[in-house]
Each structure stands twice: as structure tokens, then as C-alpha cells.
Image (cartoon, rainbow, N blue to C red):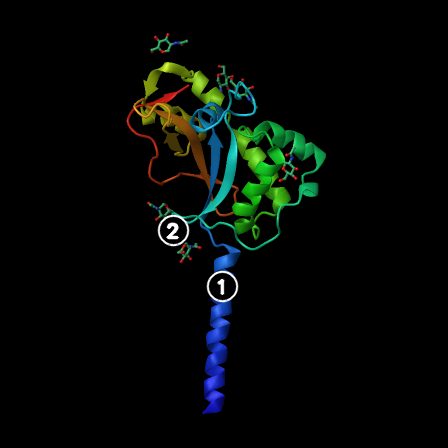
């Protein structure tokens, strides 16, 4: 009887540990590769950005391992914390262009927080170096600013756009459905929302771009300025 009890206790404990491991190692289905339009960051932020004139091209916000059944993506998983020395000089100069901190200006701090919050949840697929190299390559593969420019979509304070005005040319260029996200300017709550992010989705191995199928994050008419 004692034997049975203790082996049962052992099983329960083993299961609990297994469960904790699965939760903390971060399981995910696909990646969201999120790019942002810096002028919107600076408008919706409570205080000015470090640079007086924000960059006028899309920059990386992050590469987020995501889960179809659970929209709250895995975050802050166990795993190796960010190590600055792994951002070797050549990668650093690339990231300074593709993945700058457009708000406070501390790029390293931004990379650190994105890796610690999201990157560690897919460490079994991409180590820290591969995570940042891969993100830079995704950024380079399609120039959203240029795709929009070719479709005569130029940032403009007086014009508003529909979801498909922006999503269609991007879809035509990438052959995959993107996701758009907007934000409202708290200082101008009655004005149209501002385009903030363009999301590309990638498969589990972060190799193949796939259609995004989440819910759209922009209302009818929004502006891009
Ligand atoms: C997604 O999240 C749910 C709920 O947390 C979890 O049960 C499931 O295993 C996750 N899916 C994958 C592929 O990890
Ligand atoms: C930038 O962030 C890094 C990492 O958090 C920190 O070590 C460094 O002191 C910060 N640099 C400045 C100039 O604040
Ligand atoms: C992307 O396109 C814009 C607009 O055509 C251009 O100014 C910019 O240099 C391009 N960026 C890269 C990394 O090629
Ligand atoms: C935009 O148009 C230019 C000039 O016609 C062309 O060279 C370039 O490949 C186009 N870029 C995209 C992303 O469609
Ligand atoms: C902005 O858009 C408005 C409305 O479509 C147009 O009249 C105006 O010429 C545009 N401004 C610039 C600088 O392109
Ligand atoms: C999105 O697509 C994936 C893969 O095809 C599927 O498993 C998932 O259920 C879809 N999610 C939604 C919200 O449609």
C-alpha cells in the first residue's frame, strides 16, 4: 500500500515537472515577423522620441513565436538570456539599420527585451545569433516602404486608406497575406487611426513565409503619415 502511494506520488510529481517544462520551454506554431512605422511610434508615445525626425522606413519590432489556439503568445520563457557579445560587429551594424530602438534610442536594450521576452521561446529552433540574423534577412527580403511607394502610397497627413489599399500591394509583392495593425493617437482620439505595424507570418522553422490568418487590427479608414 505504501509502495503504491509513493509510486503514485512519484507519477504525479513527474507529470507536474513535465507540465512545467512544456509550459516554460515555450511551444509555438508559427512566427509573427512584426515591422513598425516609426512616425506612428513617436506620435502615440507619451513623450517625444530620441530623434527629432523619426526614420521614414519600416523597421523591425520583433520576431514572435506564436500559437494559433492561444492568441496570448508564449513569453518570458526559460532559456539563455540575451548576451550582447553574440551580436558580432557585422550583425550589429546591420541591426542598427533594420532593428533600431526608434523610441528611446538604446538599440541594445530593445534587442535584449525582444530576445528575453520572445526569442527565448523559440530557442529550440533559432539560437540568439540565428534569431537576429534571420530577422534581418526577413526585413531585407521585402522593402515595404518601397512596395507602397510603387503603389503610389506615400505617407500623407490628409489622406486616409482602407485596409486593402495597403494590404493588397503588399500581398501582391510577397504572395502571402499580411496583417496590419493600427493605433490611435491619444492626443487626437477623434482622428482616424494610424497605421503602425505590418505583420508577416512564417512557418515553425522561420524559413517559409505563410499567410497570416489572425484578426485584422485596423478600422475602416486609417492614415499613414
Ligand atoms: C498553444 O497554447 C495552448 C494553450 O496554452 C497549448 O495547450 C498548446 O499546446 C499550444 N500549442 C502549441 C503548438 O504549442
Ligand atoms: C542600453 O541598454 C543596455 C542594455 O540594457 C545597457 O547595458 C546600457 O547601459 C544602455 N545604454 C545607455 C546609454 O543607456
Ligand atoms: C526601401 O525603399 C525605400 C523607398 O523606395 C528606400 O528609400 C530605402 O532605401 C529602401 N531600403 C532598403 C533597405 O533597401
Ligand atoms: C518598385 O519599382 C521599381 C521601379 O519600377 C522596381 O525597380 C522595383 O523592383 C519595385 N519594387 C517593388 C518592391 O515592387
Ligand atoms: C495628400 O493627399 C491629398 C488627398 O488625396 C492630396 O490632395 C495631396 O496632394 C496629397 N499631398 C501630398 C504631399 O502628396
Ligand atoms: C490559421 O491557420 C492555421 C494553419 O492553417 C490553422 O491551424 C488555424 O486554426 C488558423 N487559425 C484561424 C484563427 O483561422
Viewed as shown, does residue 107 lie left or right of 40?
right
Which residue is the site of mark 1? 20
Q: Nearer the viewer, residue 216 or 196?
A: 196
List x then y, in percent, for residue 181. Answer: 38, 32
The residue at the point 48 percent across, 54 percent down is: 27
Q: Earlier in the sequence, mark 1 or mark 2?
A: 1
The residue at the point 45 percent across, 29 percent down is: 46
Q: Quadrant of ligand 2?
A: top right
Q: Nearer the viewer, residue 94 or 108?
A: 108
Name the image quarter holding the N terminus.
bottom left
Number of residues whose C-alpha sits closer than 10 Å to that of mark 1, classed few (under 14), some (14–19) or many (20 or more): few
Is the residue 197 above or below the residue 73 in the image?
above
Gap in angstroms between the C-alphas marked 1 and 2: 17 Å
Q: State yes or no: Cβ of the residue under disc 1 lies below 8 Å from any atom of ligand 1.
A: no
List x then y, in percent, for residue 168. Answer: 36, 26
The residue at the point 66 percent across, 33 percent down is: 92
* Closer mark to the observer between disc 1 and disc 2: 1
Is the residue 160 above or below the residue 131 in the image?
above
Which residue is the site of mark 2? 70
List x then y, in percent, for residue 128. Answer: 62, 45
Is the residue 88 above or below the residue 125 in the image?
above
Q: State yes or no: Cβ of the residue under disc 2 lies below 8 Å from any atom of ligand 1.
A: yes
Element class at badge 2: loop
Number of residues whose C-alpha sits closer than 10 Å to that of mark 2, classed few (under 14), some (14–19) or many (20 or more): few
Element class at badge 1: helix
Question: Disc 1 vs disc 2: Cβ atoms closer than 8 Å?
Answer: no
Is the residue 143 above or below the residue 130 in the image?
above
Amino acid at each position: 500500500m505504501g509502495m503504491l502511494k509513493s509510486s503514485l506520488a512519484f507519477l504525479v510529481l513527474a507529470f507536474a515537472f513535465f507540465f512545467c517544462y512544456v509550459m516554460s520551454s515555450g511551444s509555438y506554431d508559427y512566427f509573427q515577423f512584426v515591422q513598425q512605422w516609426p512616425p506612428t511610434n513617436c506620435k502615440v508615445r507619451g513623450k517625444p522620441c530620441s530623434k527629432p525626425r523619426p526614420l521614414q522606413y519600416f523597421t523591425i519590432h520583433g520576431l514572435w513565436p506564436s500559437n494559433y489556439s492561444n492568441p496570448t503568445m508564449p513569453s518570458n520563457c526559460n532559456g539563455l538570456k540575451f548576451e550582447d557579445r553574440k551580436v558580432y560587429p557585422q550583425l550589429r551594424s546591420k541591426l542598427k539599420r533594420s532593428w533600431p530602438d526608434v523610441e528611446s534610442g538604446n538599440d541594445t536594450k530593445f534587442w535584449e527585451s525582444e530576445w528575453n521576452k520572445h526569442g527565448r521561446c523559440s530557442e529550440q529552433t533559432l539560437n540568439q545569433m540565428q534569431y537576429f540574423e534571420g530577422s534581418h534577412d526577413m526585413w531585407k527580403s521585402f522593402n515595404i516602404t518601397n512596395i507602397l511607394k510603387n503603389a503610389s502610397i506615400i505617407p500623407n497627413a490628409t489622406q486616409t486608406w482602407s485596409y486593402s489599399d495597403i494590404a493588397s500591394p503588399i500581398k501582391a509583392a510577397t504572395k502571402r497575406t499580411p496583417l496590419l495593425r493600427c493605433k490611435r493617437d491619444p492626443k487626437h482620439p477623434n482622428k482616424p487611426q494610424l497605421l503602425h505595424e505590418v505583420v508577416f507570418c512564417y512557418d515553425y522553422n522561420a524559413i517559409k513565409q505563410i499567410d497570416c490568418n489572425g484578426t485584422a487590427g485596423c478600422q475602416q479608414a486609417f492614415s499613414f503619415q
